[in-house]
Image (cartoon, rainbow, N blue to C red):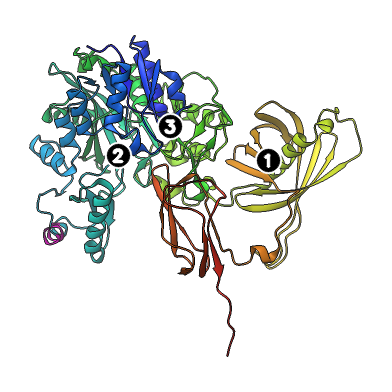
Amino acid sequence: MIHKILIANRGEIAVRVIRTARNQGFPTVAVYSEADADAMHVDAADEAVCIGGAPAAQSYLSIDNILEAAKKSQATAVHPGYGFLAENPAFVRACEAAGLVFIGPGADAMELMGSKRLSKEAMVAAGVPCIPGYHGKDQTDEVLLSEAEKIGLPLMVKASAGGGGRGMRLITQTGDLASGIQEARAGAKSTFGNDELILEKAIVEPRHIEIQVFADAHGNVIHLGERDCSVQRRHQKVVEEAPSPFVDADLREKMGQAAVNAARACNYLGAGTVEFMVDADKNFYFLEMNTRLQVEHPVTEMITGQDLVAWQIRVACGEKLPLFQDQITLLGHAIEVRLYAEDARRGFLPQTGAVLACQVPEREGVRVDSGIEAGREVAAHYDPIVAKVIAWGENRDEARRRLALVLRDMVLLGFNNNKLFLERIVNHPVFAKGEATTAFIEKHFSDDISMGKNALSDKTLALAAMIFYQGRCPQTRDAGWHNPAPYRYNFVLSCDETDYSLSLVRKDARFEVSMAAKDAADAKSAEPEEDRQVTLQWVRADDHSVIYIDGGVRRKAGYAFCDNQLFVDAGSGHFVFEDKTLHTAKSAQDTAGGGDVVSTMNGVIVEVRVSPGQRVGAGQALLVIESMKMQHQFAAAISGTVESVAAAAGDQVKPGQVLVTVAAEQDKGED
């Protein structure tokens, strides 16, 4: 019997599971790391237990700590959410041994589907279409090279134990095959502890279509339609929708039956997702089965009107599925985007910081599953997803328009995020036509403004100067704008490691902001640029939004102050400005050489590769920082000698912190 449910996860999925569990009448227990003591999911639950330090290995990945939390709180069931231990067979067996109900599939099914090699063998036996490839036990280089030649190029080399797009290599040239296999094997061993590989024929620009399946302990297995997850970046899903604009009724029936067969083949229980690759001719091939609730499950809930977490709990309680296959109906269309704490302008580097403002308009057909709110912190230790925004409509275009508008109008300030990137994807004409494949982002977004380093516009700069002025001079701000005399103020604002010199002239409510021109040497043309000027008119502001007039059009922007920093989103991206007007400029001698290696993120030092007195070359990796489950190398900008090392493995670091100082080589001149 289930009396109390412990959620072995964090963030938005923990909040979402807690909501349904409590609606079903079950008390809930949250678990949290020391870094998550003030997290949203902790407050959402009835009870909460600290399970260890900030690193996931000491907390969310510690089976012993989670079982101890269940014992302390007298929980009788565990819901794993997704990620962390959600697909760990050892965790399932440990829960069962402790007398806990695991709300998910059995360990045997999880183990089978967790291996790409073994799952493909099982699917072939069950008659489920699979991509031509090699999934054999013989893993010698000779056999893999021979099988690769039989399959032909292009070819995917995959870690058998991999997932989420990790451990994959695309081979397009014969000469890269041997090295690709060696690199994939080494990467699989270091990442997953298992160096088994599989080979598959690469499907060119496919659709990524998945089927939601559900099974109970009474032999009932059904599917709830498909989701299209084709819009991906580096094999990671960005946008998901249901139903797929590519799938017709005949293909849906065939794929649905194949997914049900896949679930039956492994004696499945609960919620699962069978993923397929579909080519342009609508041939579909089994990719993998995710033995858990998917990140994108809300789109299925919105078109079926069902709560899949409630179904999971019912099945775990031993009940039958609430509906038969012929009772499942798909109504309307739903699209979901994943909101990440990452900087699209800097290669999607993960971001951290305080949530200064988080405001989402409440509108018909819009749902937000969030793990953040104003006043919370985005930590550096975990996955950068902070929320999911989902919109439903009677048809696909209505859902798409609703989603684009709520993304535009929501306010999220305090850390750079991918909100603009998502908005531009949803508004892109190829996506609007329903023609996006897995190559969509690579083909259409390489030079998009949301990913550009020069995305900061003169208007956003001028707006930042006007907001800084208003915040600094409240006596003039509240004077009613009756003073006809112009007032001038000079600013030096820093954004994305670049300083901008601005001159602001105020006359009544109008602000004229001039930007210093680039020198001829810095300009794109041989001729020097002229000073640029933007005129804006202030209307009013509240805590986190400012209304202003630009070119006769009244507009709104989000803003927030924190210390000497201003966070602004005027519809062209999230920007952080620092007022350096009163700072003393460093001399040329202080800045010459560029010898300081500075952290650009919050994170943990995992490796320091140099020591004081060591000779290093420009571009040489000096240390490695881990942030949000990704590792980043920091290299020397110049050649020289390591003068000092201010960090050690295990240290927490912040943006702007000097980690290593390199003294530049001295020019010895000619003899």
Secondary structure, mark 2, is: strand
Is residue 146 a member of the stretch shown in magenta? yes
Q: Quadrant of the C terminus?
A: bottom right
Indicate the position of residue 44 as horizontal and vertical percent values: 44, 19
Using the numbered discs, state the Cα–Cα distance from disc 1 to disc 2 in whole angstroms. 45 Å
Q: Earlier in the sequence, mark 2 or mark 3?
A: 3
| Residue under the point 57% across and 50% down | 656
In this rendering, the answer to whether 42 lies above or below 112 is above
Q: Nearer the viewer, residue 486 or 605?
A: 605
Mark 1 or mark 2, whichever is nearer to me: 1
Q: Nearer the viewer, residue 267 or 27?
A: 27
Mark 1 or mark 3, whichever is nearer to me: 3
| Residue under the point 20% across and 38% down | 114
Indicate the position of residue 479 as horizontal and vertical percent values: 86, 28
State the predominant SS element of the stretch in magenta. Answer: helix
* Residue assigned mark 3: 34
Give the residues in magenta.
141-147
Q: Quadrant of the N terminus?
A: top left
- Residue 564 — which label? 1
Dot 2, how many residues are within 10 Å of its Cα: few (below 14), some (14-19), or many (20+)? many
